[in-house]
Each structure stands twice: as C-alpha cells, then as structure tokens.
C-alpha cells in the first residue's frame, strides 16, 4: 500500500500543510496554483455531492478512485480538510485520516501555542510524527 | 443493490441522456441535472490533472455516505455515469451493458446525430428492461457476474 502525498487545508482555503512520500509526476503548475486547484476541486466535489445525493448527506464525500490513484478525504466539523492520495487498491482510509487529525494534528498543532490558526504548519514535531505514522502504513 | 439514476454525458460535457429509477426526496429539475453533468465533466478532467502518478485517466468511482457513483469514460470522450446505493461494490457489468445498448440502439440508429440528446425509444425500453432484470435478480445476478 503506497501513500503518495497529503494536503491539509483550513476552512478558508489556505493550504496549511503539504508533504509527499512518492510522487512520480511533477505538477504542471506551480505549487501555489496546485493548492488552489486542489481546494477548488474539493469545494466543487462537496457541492456536487450535496446536490446529486438522493438523500441529504450526513458525512459527505469519502473518496474517489481513478485508474492510478485514490484520493481519500476527511473533513472535520470545523472545516479542516485532510486529503490523502494513495494507490487505488488501498482500503478504507477514513480511520487513518481521523487518527492523523486526532492524534497528530490536535496533539501537535492545536495544542502548540506557537502554531497560529490559518497559518501554514511549521512545527517539526508535527512533521516527524506524521512521517513516522504514515511510514508504518507504507510498503516500498 | 439499487440503481438510482443513469446519465450519459457527451464529450463537450453536455448531458445527452438522463433516467431516474427511484424517486428522490428532493427531485432534481432538468436544469439542475444539466448543471451537475457539466460539473462532473469538469471534475473528471481536474482529477486526471491532479494525479500524483503519470498518465491518469480521470475519476472512475466516487463514494459518499449516501451514494456511489461510477463513471465509464470511453475513448471517444462519452461518459456513462451510474448513481447507486453505497453498498454496491461493483457496477462494471451495468456500465458494460449500458455501453453495449448505447452502441446498438443509439449509434446504429440512422436518425440519431452524434453528441445530441438521446431520444431513441428502443434504447430506453431496453435499458429499463435491463435495470428491472438486474434489480429483480439482485443476489443471483451478483453471484453469477462474479
């Protein structure tokens, strides 16, 4: 099971964090443009899911799959968005994303007095904990 | 296994066919569906672009808590979209049959112009017959398809 990259966005659309573990295709736009495109796409998918759903959705969008990757999504009630790209054969990653939020983000970012809201995360502790956690899932 | 709706989108992103098999709590107007089809067409293109791996084709499956959406994108750019309940794991047989019916009853119809809305009675009849058959033989069909 390979994990390609992870994005974290806040409710205003700012990219708070991005990291990649293996990414074979370089984006054809600058990183800022890519973040905006990703956030815009997530926003549109949310609107699309809300409209097309036969009954009003409770949790919303879970994931989508293409032939080369799977995009797992988790949104917290406060509007924080976690996006994890993995290989398409990967199983359900919602628990993993929830763990990343509750055990790593809340512990090392929310409870960190130096990490301010709506600003990119620069905490090294967060980066290392996240990296160690994801590597327990990755297989090279 | 319940199929909620089937949509066919042409290569420009316009909706050319729409069929609902279950009544919705909040019915979607014709305009709403056309807008959603266009939105899906755009999303499909962006998902191919944002791929971390090279040569990605665009989203094939989308899952939410209340539905599951499968899309078959043909080499000519036509998209066949099926909306079903989330318990379904595979809708490939339906997409394949849908494509077969499209090729037989729509493309071979001399009065049908490409990329235009589908108004072929035989296509609708055969499609409804197939979906009814699938819904009636849910368990048997699913076992047989595997």
Image (cartoon, coloured by chain):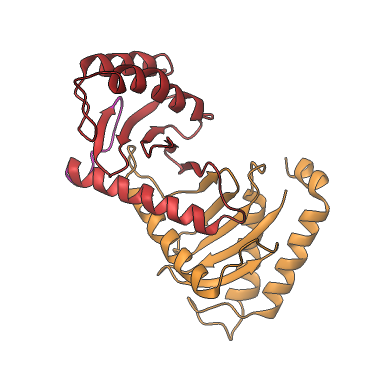
Chain colours: A red, B orange
Residue A28 in sight: no
**x and y, in percent, of residue B120 in the image:** 64, 79
Q: Say if A95 sits above or below B1 in the image.
A: above
- Residue A83 falls inside the magenta stretch: no
Q: Quadrant of residue B104?
A: bottom right
Residue A9's image quarter? top left
Q: Percent from the top left, x then y, of residue B118? A: 58, 77
- Residue extending furthest toward the bottom: B111
What is the residue that sits farthest to the front in this orientation? Answer: A113
Q: Residue at 73% across / 69% down in the picture?
A: B126
Which stretch is magenta? A20-30
Q: Which residue is nearer to you in this view: A119 or A33?
A: A119
| Image height of A8 relative to B4, above or below | above
Residue found 56% across the figure and 51% down from its top: B69
The foreground one among B23 and A3 is B23
Count of labels in the image: 0
Rendered location of residue A49, percent (x, y):
50, 53
């Amino acid at each position: 099971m390979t994990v390609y990259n992870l994005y974290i966005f806040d409710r205003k659309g700012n990219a708070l964090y991005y990291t990649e573990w293996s990414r074979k295709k370089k984006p054809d736009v600058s990183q800022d443009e890519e973040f905006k495109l990703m956030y815009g796409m997530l926003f549109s998918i949310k609107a699309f899911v809300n409209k097309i759903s036969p009954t009003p959705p409770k949790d919303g969008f879970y994931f989508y799959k293409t032939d080369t990757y799977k995009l797992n999504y988790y949104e917290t009630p406060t509007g924080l968005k976690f996006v994890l790209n993995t290989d398409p054969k990967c199983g359900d990653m919602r628990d993993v994303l929830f763990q990343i939020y509750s055990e790593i983000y809340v512990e090392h970012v929310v409870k960190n007095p130096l990490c301010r809201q709506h600003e990119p995360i620069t905490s090294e502790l967060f980066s290392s904990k996240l990296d160690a956690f994801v590597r327990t899932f990755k297989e090279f | 296994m319940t199929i909620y709706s089937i949509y066919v989108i042409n290569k420009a992103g316009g909706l050319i066919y729409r069929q609902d098999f279950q009544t919705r709590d909040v019915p979607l107007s014709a305009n709403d569906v056309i807008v959603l089809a266009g939105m899906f067409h755009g999303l499909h293109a962006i998902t191919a672009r944002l791929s971390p791996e090279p040569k990605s084709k665009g989203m094939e499956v989308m899952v939410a808590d209340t539905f599951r959406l499968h899309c078959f994108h043909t080499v000519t750019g036509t998209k066949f979209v099926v909306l079903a309940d989330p318990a379904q794991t595979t809708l490939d047989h339906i997409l394949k049959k849908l494509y077969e019916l499209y090729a037989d009853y729509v493309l071979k119809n001399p009065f049908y112009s490409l990329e235009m809305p589908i108004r072929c009675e035989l296509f609708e009849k055969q499609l409804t017959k197939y979906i009814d058959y699938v819904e009636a033989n849910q368990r048997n069909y699913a076992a047989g398809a595997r």
